[in-house]
C-alpha cells in the first residue's frame, strides 16, 4: 500500500524544523555548560605521581626498539623490580586505593554531575516531544521497514493501515538523537558532544585507575621483546647523505 | 622517530616503511584518523541532502550512500598520493573507518531533505 499521504506544510514548519533546531541548540548548550561546570580539582600529588610513572612506562614501551638492548633492560628492571621497582604495588595497598576512590565525595560529585548533565536534557526533550508532538504523522522515512517496527515508530498514530514509513515525531526525535552526533563533532571541534557511552565508560573506569593500570603496565613491560630497530641506520644515513651530495 | 610532518597538506606522514620495524608517529596517525572522520561525516551529510532532493527511496538510497563513501575513500587515497602505508597503518582504516557512524547522519539528512522536498 503505497498511497502518498499529503501532509500539511504546517507540520514541517512547526515540528520537524523546530525539533531539529532545538536539539542542536541543546547540544551546544550542554557543551558549554559542561565546560563551565568543570570544577577545578586540586590534583592529589600521589595520584599525579602514579600517573606520570605510568606515562613513563608507556613511553618506554613505545620507544623500546630505539634504544640499545642493555639500556632497555636496565630501564625495565628499574620499573618492574620486585622490591623497589616503581610499578610494583603490594596487594594490600591496591585495595585501599579503590575504596578511597569511591568514598571520596569530590570524585563522586563530579561523576554525578557529568552523568546528570548527559541524562537530564535528553529526558526533558523526550518528555516535551511526547507532550506536544504526539498523535499525528510527522515525517516519512524514505526507506521501507518491516511491520515489526510499526509499534516502535508509529507511537501516537492509531491507524494500522498507514504505511510503516509514515512515522510519528518520537521517531524523528530518535533519528535526530543519533544523526546529530556527526554534526556536533563538526561544529564543536573534537568529538566531545554526545559520546555518552564513551564518556560513561571513562568515568566509571577512572576510579580503578591507579591499582590495576600499574600492574597492567608492569605486565606489558615484562612481555615486550626487544628488537633492535636501528642496526642498519648507519647504512641508511650513508645513503641519505649520498643522495644529498649528488 | 621515523615520521615527519608535511605542513602544507592536512595529512601527516605517520610511518616509514623503509626500516625493518615499521614505526608510527602516534600523534600524526591520530590526526589522520580525525581527518578521515571529518571528511566522512561531512560527505555523508551532503550525500544525505542530495539523496533526499533527488527522491531516492529504499534500497537505492543506501546504494547511493555507499557510492558516496567510496568516492570519499578514493578522494582520501588520492590525497595521500596513493602511498597509503606511509600515512596509515592499514588499508582498513582508510576504507572502512567511520562508515557506520556516517550512516546515521546520512539517514537523518536524507529523511529531512526528502520530506521537505517531496512530501510537504
Image: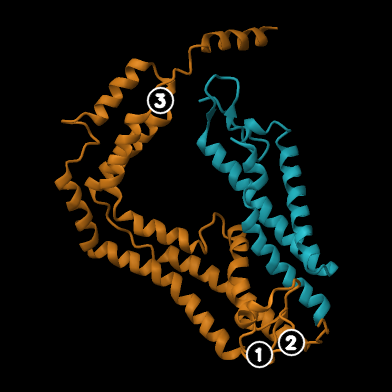
Chain drawn cyan, letter? Answer: B
Chain label for disc 1: A
Q: How is the image coloured?
A: by chain
A234 relative position to A165: left or right: left
Asked if both marks, 2 and 1, belong to the same chain, the answer given is yes
The chain coloured orange is A
The quarter of the image holding the C terminus of chain A is: top right
Element assignment for label 3: helix
Q: Which mark is residue A157?
A: 1
Which residue occupies 74% across, 73% down?
A144
The answer to whether mark 3 and mark 1 are in CB contact below 8 A is: no
Dot in front, 2 or 1:
2
- Label 2 crowd bin: few (<14), some (14–19), many (20+), radius 10 Å: some
Q: Nearer the viewer, residue A136 or B37?
A: A136
Quick one: which residue is furthest to the front in this view?
Answer: A147
Secondary structure, mark 2, is loop
Q: Chain of mark 2?
A: A
Residue A93 appears anywhere in the view:
yes
Q: Which residue is mark 2?
A: A162
Task: Kindly identify which residue carries mark 3.
Answer: A64
Alpha-carbon distance for marks 3 and 1? 63 Å
**Marks 2/1: CA–CA distance:** 9 Å
The quadrant in which the N terminus of chain A is found is bottom right
Amino acid at each position: 500500500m503505497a498511497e502518498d499521504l499529503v501532509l500539511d506544510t504546517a507540520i514541517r514548519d512547526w515540528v520537524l524544523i523546530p525539533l531539529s533546531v532545538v536539539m542542536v541548540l541543546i547540544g551546544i548548550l550542554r557543551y558549554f555548560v559542561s565546560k563551565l561546570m568543570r570544577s577545578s580539582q586540586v590534583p592529589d600529588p600521589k595520584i599525579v605521581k602514579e600517573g606520570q610513572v605510568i606515562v613513563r612506562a608507556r613511553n618506554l614501551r613505545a620507544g623500546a626498539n630505539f634504544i640499545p638492548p642493555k639500556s632497555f633492560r636496565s630501564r625495565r628492571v628499574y620499573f618492574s623490580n620486585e622490591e623497589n621497582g616503581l610499578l610494583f604495588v603490594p596487594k594490600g595497598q591496591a585495595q585501599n586505593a579503590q575504596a578511597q576512590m569511591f568514598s571520596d565525595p569530590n570524585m563522586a560529585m563530579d561523576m554525578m554531575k557529568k552523568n546528570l548533565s548527559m541524562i537530564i536534557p535528553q529526558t526533558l526533550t523526550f518528555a516535551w516531544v511526547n507532550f506536544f508532538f504526539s498523535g499525528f504523522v510527522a515525517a516519512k522515512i524514505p526507506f521501507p521497514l518491516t511491520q515489526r517496527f510499526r509499534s516502535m515508530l508509529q507511537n501516537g498514530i492509531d491507524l494500522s493501515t498507514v504505511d510503516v514509513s509514515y512515522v510519528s515525531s518520537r521517531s524523528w526525535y530518535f533519528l535526530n538523537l543519533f544523526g546529530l552526533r556527526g554534526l556536533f563533532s563538526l561544529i564543536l571541534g573534537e568529538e566531545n558532544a554526545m559520546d555518552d557511552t564513551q564518556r560513561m565508560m571513562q568515568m566509571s573506569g577512572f576510579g580503578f585507575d591507579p591499582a590495576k593500570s600499574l600492574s597492567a603496565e608492569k605486565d606489558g613491560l615484562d612481555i615486550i621483546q626487544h628488537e633492535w630497530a636501528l642496526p642498519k641506520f648507519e647504512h641508511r644515513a650513508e645513503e641519505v647523505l649520498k643522495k644529498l651530495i649528488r | 622517530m621515523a615520521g615527519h610532518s608535511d605542513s602544507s597538506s592536512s595529512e601527516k606522514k605517520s610511518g616509514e616503511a623503509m626500516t625493518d620495524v615499521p614505526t608510527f608517529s602516534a600523534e600524526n596517525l591520530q590526526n589522520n584518523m580525525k581527518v578521515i572522520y571529518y571528511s566522512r561525516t561531512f560527505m555523508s551529510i551532503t550525500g544525505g541532502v542530495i539523496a533526499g532532493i533527488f527522491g531516492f527511496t529504499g534500497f537505492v538510497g543506501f546504494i547511493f550512500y555507499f557510492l558516496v563513501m567510496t568516492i570519499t575513500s578514493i578522494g582520501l587515497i588520492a590525497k595521500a598520493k596513493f602511498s597509503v602505508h606511509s600515512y596509515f597503518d592499514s588499508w582498513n582504516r582508510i576504507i572502512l573507518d567511520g562508515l557506520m557512524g556516517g550512516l546515521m547522519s546520512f539517514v537523518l539528512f536524507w529523511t529531512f531533505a526528502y520530506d521537505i522536498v517531496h512530501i510537504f
